Image (cartoon, coloured by chain):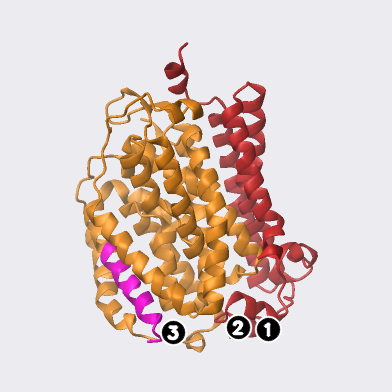
Chain colours: A orange, B red
Amino acid sequence: MPSVTTGLVAVPNIPHLNAEPAAFGGNLKLILPPILGLLLLMPQAVFAQTDTNALPWWGWAFLLFLTSFLIGIFGVLAGIGGGVLFVPLVSSFFPFHIDFVRGAGLFIALSSALAAAPGLLKANLASIKLAFPAGLIASAFSLVGAMLGLWLSALNPGYIHGSLGLLIMIIVGIMFFSKRTDYPAVNPNDKWAAFFNIGGTYIEGTTGKQIQWTVHRTLPGLFSFSLVGLLAGMFGMGAGWANVPVLNLIMGAPVKVAVATSGFILSITDSAAWFYLNKGAVLPLVVVPSMVGIILGSRIGAKLLPKVEPGLIRMILMVVLLLAGLRSFVKAFGI
Amino acid sequence: MNELETRYQNLPCQQSYAKLLGILVNLDLALLILTFAIYSFGLIDPLLPIKELTAAWGLPAGDYIARTGGITGWGWALKLNYGDYIPFIGIAFLASNSMICYAIAGGMTLRRGRFVIGFNIVLDFAVSFLAASDLLHNLH
């Protein structure tokens, strides 16, 4: 059975890339109570104010580590990137300015993508030939997004909180309604796919069959990455939620290739992270506990993955995201 | 071999890229934990006391820099005698991982005559290098 690395650990057969759901397991009984507790507390938290003096600095650092650790676990279980959960949750419930949260979010997305990339590349699920043209466009536009985001939040942080809240609600909608296609029918005569030589071969873990794939609608697909990069840079989030539909539904890459290559694209979209670092929007006290937390959490999540029902976890996390999006939106009005 | 058959072939440099990145990521984790431990346990005195940092972390990045006398760009590299700047070694090294891999993959693909993907990787390197160089920060 082939194995890949997710969050620095070997995971047999990349279960979250499998189309078949894992069996409902006993571990879920242990996981559900804290999640449900969190859900019950969150409506109150939506209208709560964060006070720096409520905790000493190490308390905030520990809470950040714990939050990122949980995001790491549930992000892997639900197949949702860490950045998309981190930014709305931490910007809503922690005292750090959203500039520092976005800086940390970009580094979280980068570190978790870097940790997963070697295994995905070795298994030939992530493709360099598909990732580099898309990553080039996403990376360049993420720089523009980063400039725009920092400029807007300097004018009024409410602009970023409000638009982030709206975007999060749209992302939940996309996650809820989008349907993935395991093996889309692809017209192999796309001249841009031929020009970039985009295609590849991998072994399907569940059947042992060799799958050859290529893409179509290459030009509109690649142009879509300009918007993806812009949003990722502007809000400091990984953009797996957008990469996968573009690669799978527009360009026709098989779903496993789309998910794996999306992760790899995040690892090469490092420009916005550099921009935030150079602007002084990266605080080690915020970034390092978050990165270590998410990497360790991803390891636990990867171990729990075969034993839980990913669909249910995904649904619960969508509710958490929706509440975090609502909180962010409310914060835009100074509430 | 026709064009479609070459399209279905994975690039040979993909495996080298994966191996190199795997090594770099393990180094990242070690560096992040080590440098943050030096900072958080106060083994080397910070330039900015943590109390002042927590009082300012709710400000926009620009105001934070102005209030704390913080450093932008690569200025942190000149302040490594202070504990609060040491974690930037791990952070910047992690952000450099892909550029190190681009250099290897770009060289391999160009040597094998794969000019389209090779040039693409060179452009990716250029965008990351531009972002890392701090030139855009000065323009912004």
Spatial separation of the CA atoms under disc 3 and disc 1: 21 Å
Residue A50, labelled with which disc?
Answer: 3
- Comparing labels 3 and 1, the label whose residue is closer to the camera: 1
Spatial separation of the CA atoms under disc 3 and disc 2: 14 Å
Q: What x and y, as percent, mark residue B23?
A: 60, 41
Amino acid found under the numbered disc labelled 3: Thr
Amino acid found under the numbered disc labelled 1: Arg
Q: Is residue A256 positioned above or below B110 on the image? A: below
Residue A278 occupies quadrant: bottom right
Q: Which residue is mark 2?
A: B56
Residue B48 occupies quadrant: bottom right
Q: Which residue is mark 1?
A: B67
Magenta residue check for A16: no
Mark 3 chain = A
- The magenta segment: A318-335
Q: Residue at x 69, y 63 (%)?
A: B139
SS class of the residue under badge 1? helix
Q: Residue at x 63, y 48 (%)?
A: B127
Spatial separation of the CA atoms under disc 1 and disc 2: 8 Å
Magenta segment, prevailing SS (helix, strand or loop): helix
Mark 1 chain = B
Count neighbours of disc 3 (C-alpha within 10 A) and say few if under 14, some if 14 to 19, many if 20 or more: some
Q: Are marks 3 and 2 in contact (CB under 8 Å)?
A: no
Q: Are marks 1 and 2 in contact (CB under 8 Å)?
A: yes
